[in-house]
Amino acid sequence: MTSHILAIDQGTTSSRAIIFDDNFHIVSVAQQELTQFFPKSGWVEHDGEEILRSTLATCHKALDQSGLQGSDIDAIGITNQRETTIVWDKQTGKPIHRAIVWQDRRTSAFCASLDSWGYGPMITNKTGLLPDSYFSATKIKWLLDNVGDARKKADRGQLLFGTVDTFLLWHLTGKKIHATDATNASRTMLYNIHENCWDHELLEILDIPRAMLPEVQDSSADFGTTTPELFGAPIRIGGVAGDQQAALVGQACFAPGMVKSTYGTGCFIVLNTGEQPVTSDNRLLTTIGYRLRGKTTYALEGSIFVAGSAVQWMRDAMGLIESAEQTGELAGQADPDQDVYLVPAFTGLGAPHWDGNARGAIFGITRATGPAELSRAALESVCYQTRDLLDAMQKDWGKMGDTVLRVDGGMVASNYTMQFLADILNAPVDRPVILETTALGAAYLAGLHIGMVPSLEKISASWQLNRQFRPSLDDAVRLRKYNGWKEAVRRTLSTG
Ligand SMILES: Nc1ncnc2c1ncn2[C@@H]1O[C@H](COP(=O)(O)OP(=O)(O)O)[C@@H](O)[C@H]1O
Ligand SMILES: O=P(O)(O)OC[C@H](O)CO
């Protein structure tokens, strides 16, 4: 009989559930968009209960569409938007506040203080990260300091913290399992990635009770079973990883030097650096790529906060397009003589600038500029930022000469964007057959745990190319365009 794995991919834009068969072919997909709340400039929130509801709804829908029962599913793998912070009441399971999303900048000033108090190098040494509001730690502190009697309750052990994986695990297992995996833990700015444990000094500085934190497991491990009433039968949960690390697994980037870039709401480039963590001199993050059988594989990561969300902004806030797909077609019609640049610093700029105070800007508009030029500028901005990060990685890692970038995520459906990416990088870009690599990675992790996937080698052998985009832009044009981008960024930085 065929085996099946249900992958839950709880992303920033939407919750998705995907059922894979034992050849890791997709059997069914269900998706539900998530409400985005922007209560103040630079603040971004989600409703934790909506995250749970939409996740369960998509799981049920994927099961219905496939004609399968809960008892036909051998294991669940969970992957999630990372850093997004939920604090909930242990008794009721209800969040004490909306989830503070990874993009939220409300703790920027406090992070700048951490830096000015001299904690920056210690934080980087221990966690591989920089003191930035992107990560969970200062979001937890904000919740404890600003929500009613949260601090008192936390001190009494009545509150729990989790990233989205942990919150889902808690509810899927009937409030039994309070756990996360090493990849998610490595994004909290509270986890010592070298010693593989929560760091007491950081917890003390941020005044966060240790008892709120989940147990940290391998990415492929026993995460408990779902309560029988949810899907009609208990299902084992065998894999958990943050979405960017799950994509690293789904893209089979297992050898040091292999690199993937995922274009969803944001864009995240992750380079496998093997068993040794590499410290960046160029403001990239050192993070955990995956932890299997107690062995940690490290990665260097560059994080861009706005990728597909620039396209969403064009659609929802500006009303310039009706659907995301339209941007590619419009970009192809844009006037080649107009050098229009969009720097989408809607919530600051991530790597390698880390400027939380920068805000978006458009340069080079004339009376003739319209939706076509703006669409092109939005799509190209993602490619320029990828080049910024790969240049930084090249400096840190130094061995990226013939690296081929493996891409995935919603935005890589755009041929225009992928061709421009290859052009501006002057390097090939490989798009795989399965674009749902994040979910695929979570399914592989669950499959490894239950023995359905024998080895990482087997995963590598299964990776299939859909299309390779090869650079075809004239060198002089590439240089002119990229220099124009760098100038646009320079003028956008809050320090500039
Ligand atoms: N054809 C397309 N062209 C450009 N952008 C696209 C296209 N299709 C989807 N997107 C963008 O990709 C994002 C969705 O990607 P997805 O991987 O589902 O995101 P997430 O995992 O962050 O929820 C959206 O922001 C959307 O605007
Ligand atoms: O939801 P995504 O796919 O944009 O990913 C969000 C990242 O995990 C944030 O670090």
Image (cartoon, grey):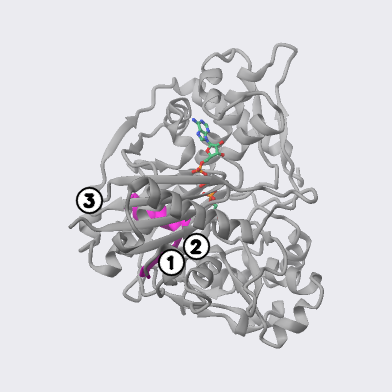
Q: Which residues are magenta?
A: 234-252
Q: Tell me: residue 404, above or below residue 48.
A: above
Q: Tell me: residue 14, above or below residue 114.
A: above
**Viewed as shown, does residue 181 lie left or right of 205?**
left
Question: Quadrant location of residue 212?
Answer: bottom right
Could you tell which of marks 3 and 2 lies nearer the N-terminus?
A: 3
Q: For the residues marked 3 and 2, what is the alpha-carbon distance in whole angstroms? A: 33 Å
Residue highlighted by disc 3: 23
- Whether residue 290 is visible: no
Residue highlighted by disc 2: 286
Q: Quadrant of the C terminus?
A: top right
Q: Position of residue 154 (x, y in %)?
A: 70, 82
Kindly identify which numbered label has been placed on residue 42. Answer: none
Residue highlighted by disc 1: 277
- Could you tell me which residue is drawn at 35 percent across and 43 percent down? 401
- Amino acid type shown at disc 1: Pro
Q: Tell me: residue 307, above or below residue 208.
A: above
Q: For the residues marked 2 and 1, what is the alpha-carbon distance in whole angstroms? A: 7 Å
Determine contact: label 2, label 1, CB under 8 Å: yes
Q: Nearer the viewer, mark 1 or mark 3?
A: 3
- Amino acid type shown at disc 3: Asn
